[in-house]
Image (cartoon, grey):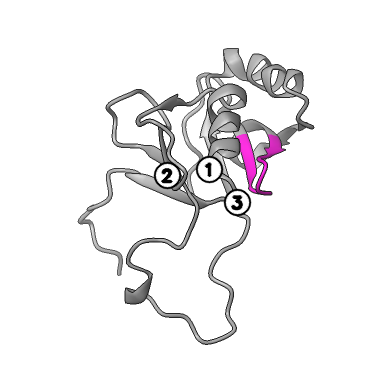
Amino acid sequence: MASSVRFSRGFAEIVLIVAEVSRSATFYRDVVGLIPETEVSPEWAWFWAGEPGISQRLALHRGPLLFEEHSPLPLGTPRFGPIHFAFAVESTELEAAAAKVRCAGVTVYGPTRLEWMRAVSYYFYDPDGNLLEWWSRDPDTAPPSC
């Protein structure tokens, strides 16, 4: 039986391991449009993934991650690799968001209709091969029930 206690209030941060922090920081600032939280260093860059000050951040890091020693993997098991994540976009801004990425010379895939979520998405890759998504729920629809 599922507990009714809810601890999570959303993501505090996502940390991506990247090959070159400055290159990836430029992409996330200029192409994705995220607002930097900190100055870019050779090792780290932090961005607000939503409104500045709200605890949803994206970090870029030239690995390894901090505290890895507390979560060992079996020998030979890769720890990092490309991932997928989505940014919520207002439905009225979805086409403009996709156009901005295209204008930066990045291939954009979509629109893709996600009927089960009553949403539309566009997909594109960052310089490190992570699959990003602009995602927008249909206006005036509630989340689907299970």
- Callout 1 amino acid: Val
Which of the numbered marks, if any, corresponds to residue 21? Answer: 1
Residue at image coords 43%, 34%: 40
Residue at image coords 53%, 70%: 79
Which of these two is toward me, 57 or 29? 29
Work out whether mark 2 precedes mark 1 in sequence or the reverse, and give the earlier one.
1
Which of the numbered marks, if any, corresponds to residue 101? Answer: none
Residue at image coords 27%, 50%: 8
Which of the numbered marks, if any, corresponds to residue 44? Answer: 2
From mark 2 to mark 1, how far is it between C-alphas? 6 Å
Q: In screen coordinates, is 111 left or right of 117?
A: right
Counting from the top left corner in percent of width and height, residue 107 is at: 79, 32
Residue at image coords 58%, 80%: 77
From mark 3 to mark 2, how far is it between C-alphas? 11 Å
Check contact, mark 3 vs mark 1: CB within 8 A: no
Specify few, some or many for label 2: CA neighbours under 10 Å numbering under 14, 14-19, or 20 or more.
many
Residue found at the very far bottom of the displayed protein = 75
- Callout 2 amino acid: Trp
Which of these two is toward me, 91 or 107? 107
Counting from the top left corner in percent of width and height, residue 37 is at: 35, 29
Counting from the top left corner in percent of width and height, residue 32 is at: 58, 27
Determine which residue is flagged by label 3.
19
Q: What's the magenta region? A: 123-133
Check contact, mark 2 vs mark 1: CB within 8 A: yes
Report whether residue 42 is seen. yes
Which of these two is toward me, 138 or 50? 50
- Callout 3 amino acid: Ala
